[in-house]
Each structure stands twice: as structure tokens, then as C-alpha cells.
Image: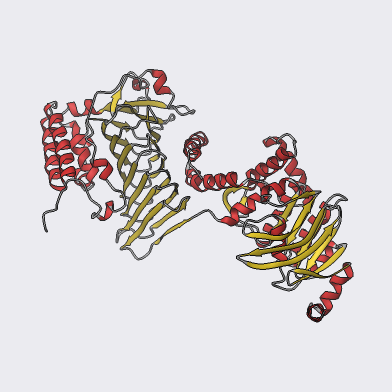
Amino acid sequence: MEPRKISPVVQQAVDHYIDQSQTLNQHTENQSLQSLRAKAQMLFADRAFPTQKDEDWQYTKLRSFTQNHFKSQPAKHLTLEQVNQFLPDFPVTKVVFVDGWFNEALSDDLGALPKQASFESYADVTEQTGDFHKLYEHEDDVAKEPFGLLNSCLAADGFFFELEANATLETPLFILHIQTNALQSVQVRNRIDVDENAEMTIVERYVSLDPNQSEAAFTNVVTQIDVAKYARVRQIIMQEQHENAFYFNNQYVFQQDHSNFITFFGSTGSLISRHQNHLWMNGEHIETEQNSACLARNNQTVDSRTDTQHNDVWGLSQQLHKYVLADSSTGVFNGMIRVDQKAQKTDGQMDNGNLILSNKARMDTKPQLEIYADDVKCSHGSATGQIDDKQIFYMQARGINKSDAIRIITHAFLLEPTESISNDGIRAWVVSRLSNGLEKINH
Amino acid sequence: MLLKVENLHAEIDDKEIIKGLNLEIKPGEIHAIMGPNGAGKSTLANVLVGRDEYEVTDGSIEFDGEDLDELDPEERAHKGMFLAFQYPVEIPGVSNKFFMQTAVNAVRNERGQPELDMFEFDEFAKEKIELLDMRSDLLDRSVNVGFSGGEKKRNDIFQMALLEPKLCIMDETDSGLDIDALKLVANGVNSLRSPDRSFIVVTHYQRLLDYIKPDYVHVLYDGKIVKSGGFELGQQLEEQGYDEIIRHYHNG
């Protein structure tokens, strides 16, 4: 293969992040972690950032990203009041990160969690040479993603959460990320272990303190979630950073027999937002649901991806991904369902629907199936279109004015995936967050 | 006079469909508009309620003493016009209840009446559902999604009952309905009849008229009303078809 040509701008960015990673290593005493990062640096130096020639990055253009040199900086001081404005209106256990740094003082007392639950910060975990591996268990898979690899170079905070077997966490864990600094690089590495027959709900929210900040910021998350036998996990993620921010999130989910995992991703913020689920269904009778509601306007790009691997019999996976695209925005959906030869009786459904509100907006969608078993039921569908004039006229003829009709139809379209959220309070909150995003759209 | 249409000319995609139509309707009257395919029946219904794609090129439509020229469909709805659709439209994700509460309140606002809150609307809707003998789960379902043809038409009649219009225009509401569904629709219409509510029933066939019994029957052909009469004209058309009238029009 020809050596790839790297533009000077991209090369400078690569050098910058390798430099950042080396500095980070100088402040680490854990030698195993140092060598893990050093290995990631070498790979990253070799691969650099993807370009539009990479199939998976054809529509999510990184030019605006690589022009910036994001830095890891100390967090701004925030008051409890500034933090609490971002709390939802249902009871939660709050875990606060400011500019990527875990803030114990602004978080709820995590010692007060039920005794079957334990929370450790990244610093606590990486202090122990032997223990830190639990945050870096699947490095080969993580390294396949450019931003996963960069996270291996730069992760400096995050958490490890474990819920013991048979325990139920009644109050959702609310992970709040508040970005404040201009040009901040936020690199977070997390792991959530939900043991056999345990149950919990995780709500994550990504916001900017100043919704009108004009300087860019960079959030890059890698989370591993292990859902043990018969365990049940619900996850809600709302990405609402300011519109010059960059958001990348790679989730690696491992499910065992009879487990149930439902994840919802809602996106209204950031200039580029790219959310990826890598899901392994490694057992029988696993149920999983992955849904997203993505809204973009102006020059925003929103990119949601799923890679679902059915590796055993009687697996059920369902997906619904809805996009509303205004102005000159871009939407990208890429979904892959792989069904192993062994995974008979698999039922895999993937749907993607896109509403285009402007002639300049564009949607690129690629739902895919790869099936090696012969007794399966799988389907995928995708539809992209504009609001039907007949619907608008029907509503007008009933006395509803045209702009309200468009608003109501758009709203209903985007909110369909929220119907999978079974908790009324959480669903109402997600609906209100997405509605807030919809209010900003010019029709 | 509730509706006064004078020398109406209208076109769609630069093609003239309505070519000088006159029609007068007094409060409480029921007028049937019949005619062969392509005569302009659906166009007339759509033009009366102000659909965007249709352009009035000449003549006037006066409703309740006011010229409707340039008024949007929603403004005509506020003034008391209602169109029952030939093909009621599906709106996924929007419940009938939310849709109709929004519509009723939009109309009430225009009429200077206070908006109905959720509970008041529930009461109001329940009354109408009982009046029309409809299923109560109608309100919780998405607008027309998964409805049978008959259910969609009945949902339109339900909306008509809620909006309490002065003029109901029914655009081939009978098309595609079996006899039972047709009777339900006709019963709905009959229960909404009143001295200050008028109807225009656009239809190709006589059978709906047997249940609704219009005061006047007009034959629309080539964009004009070419013959008018009483209820018996419909019966005559049922027996003889439109050929005689068309031949007379071309020779006349």
C-alpha cells in the first residue's frame, strides 16, 4: 500500500495530540498505563485522522475539527447553582464532570449509594497498576476507531461503576458533563458493570455552560458497558453542547444470556456529533434496543452508528433512528447487523427515517445486514423525505395555521423513538429537551 | 345568503378546471353537486376551502357576507368552512386528541371564545362521540393511521362535529364505503343538520343522497353547473346517467 499522504494541517494536529499524550504520561506513575498510551501514540502517529477517502468518514468531514488544537486544561470553578440548572426534574444520583474532570464536590455523595453499588473515579482506578486494565479491556476494538484510539492516548478521567448481582438501583445514575473552557479537550474513559440479574438506569447529559460560546471544544468519550446474565440496563444520552463543539462517543456493550439493554441517543448540539454503539450479543435470548433522535440545523453534522453482532441463538435487536435536518445540516446514519452462523432464530429490525426541512440539508444513510445463519428474521429500512403537503393542508383545513402544522408534524416525527423510554418522567424530560432543540429551527 | 359563488374561474397547473360557476346557498340548505369524472367536482371543493395549488383567476366567493379572496385555508376554517376529504390524510405520531384540541382551540381563539383545557376538551369530545355513536378509543390513536377507509371518513365527520362549522363540504365522502359505513356517515351528517348549518355534498352517485336527502341537486360538467333541480334530479340521473345532460349541453 502506498504510504498515505497527510496534509500539513492534519500532521500538526496529530503531533499536537501525541505531544499532549506524552505530557500526560509524564504525570503518570503507573508504568503499565504509560506503555499502553505509548503504544496508542505509535498507532495514532501511523494512522492519523481519517479523511473523506475513508468510507466511514466520507460524510462526516473533520476539516473544521483538525484546524483546532484542543488542550487539556484545568476545569473552571462552578457553583452548585450553575450545575443544578442542568439537572432533570426526576430524582437522580448526580455525577458531575466539568471540562472532563470528575468533580466530587459538585456531585452527590456517592458513598451514599446502595452498598451493592460502587463508584470509582479514573484516578482511583489507575492508581492501582493491576486494576487499571478494567478501563482498557478491549483496546484492540477501541483502536479500530480513530477517536477510540485517540481516547486511549489522551483519556485522563472517567469512572468505573459496578452494580452487584441481584441489585436494583432505584434512582437513575445521572452523568453530567459540563463544558466551559474554550478549546478544551475532554477525554473520558468509563466502564459500567451490571452484574447478574441486576438492574439500573443511566442518564448522560452533555452540555456547555455557555450555549452561545463561539470557540470550539472537543469531547471524546469511550465507555464499556457489561450487561451480565439476566441484567437489565436502560441508558439515555442527551447531547446538547453548543454549536461549535465536537462530540465523539464510542460505546462498547457486551451482553450475556437473557440480558436486556435499551439505549437512546438524543442529539441537538455540537458542530459535529458522532455517536457509535458497538454491541456484542454474546449469549442466548438477549434483547436489545438502540434508538436515536437526531436534530441538526445550520452547518451541524449529526452522525449515529450502530454495529450489532448477534452471536448466539434467539437474539432480538430493534432499532429506530430518526433525523430532522434543517438549513445546511448533514445527517449520517450507518447501521450494521451481523448475524453469526451460530445465531439461529435471530430477530433483527433496523429502521431509519429522515425528514429534510431544507433544500440544502442532506442525509446519507447506510443500513446493512450481514447474515451467516439460515433461520433468522432480519429487516432494515430507510426513508428520507420532506413534509407531505397533503398533511399540512389537512391540518390547515381544520384551522391550524401552516407554521404550527409544520411544527406539529416535525415534532411527532422526531419524537417517535422516545416512545421506547418506559419511565414517564424520563421520557417527558427527553421530550422537553428535544422540543427545546426543535424550537430553534427555522421552517 | 351563506355562500355566494359568482362566475368562478379556477385553474391548477395552468389548466382551467372551473369555468364560470355560479352557486348560492342559504343557511340550513343541503346542496348536492353531482357530475361525471373530470367535471371539476373535487376542484370546486378544494377551491372553496382555499387550497394553495388552485388559483382563482376570475369571479368571487363570498362566505357569510365576506369575500374569501386571498384567505388561507385555516382562516376559512376559522370562519366556519369545513372540508370532509375524499382521502383523509394520515399524520403519524400526532394523536387525534391533540390534533383536534389544537384545531378546536385555534377556531375558538378566532371566534373570541376561551380555549378548552384538556379536561374540558375531553368532556366536549365525549359528547360528540356519543352523538355520532363512535368508538371512544378514536381519540387516543394517531390521526387516521391504521384506520380503515370507513373509519377515516367517520373520523372526518367527528372532526366536523367538534368544529361546529357553518358550511360542510363533503368531497366524495361516499367513495369506497360499503353500505354499513355509508349509513354511519349519513347518520353522522343527519345528526349534525341544523337550521344554521349548510352542506355541499359532492358525489358521483345517488346512493349517499338517498340517506341525506338534499334540498337541491346540481350537475357539474366542464367546470360549470349545467343543470339544477330538486332531490328528484338525483334520482333521474341515477336512472338515465349523465349522457342526456351532456348531449344537451353540447348542443345547447
Picture quadrant of residue B227: bottom right
Q: Is residue A176 left or right of residue A24?
A: right
Task: Residue B210: tell me if it is visible.
Answer: no
Q: Nearer the viewer, residue A395 or B53?
A: B53
Location of residue A181 in the rendering, given as x and y in whole percent from the top left corner: 29, 27
Instruction: Relative to A99, say whether B238 is above or below.
Output: below
The number of numbered discs placed on residues in the rendered structure image is: 0
Residue at 42 percent across and 40 percent down: it is A268
Say left or right for B145 vs B249.
left
- Left or right? Give the position of A301 relative to A143: right
Q: Nearer the viewer, residue B78 or A305?
A: B78
Q: Point out residue A139 in the picture as x, y percentages from the top left corner.
A: 19, 43
Q: From the image, which quarter does the N terminus of chain A lie in?
A: bottom left
Depth order, front residue of B8/A4: B8
Q: Is residue A275 visible?
A: yes
Judge whether B177 appears above or below A189 on screen.
below
Location of residue B232 in the rendering, given as x and y in whole percent from the top left corner: 89, 70
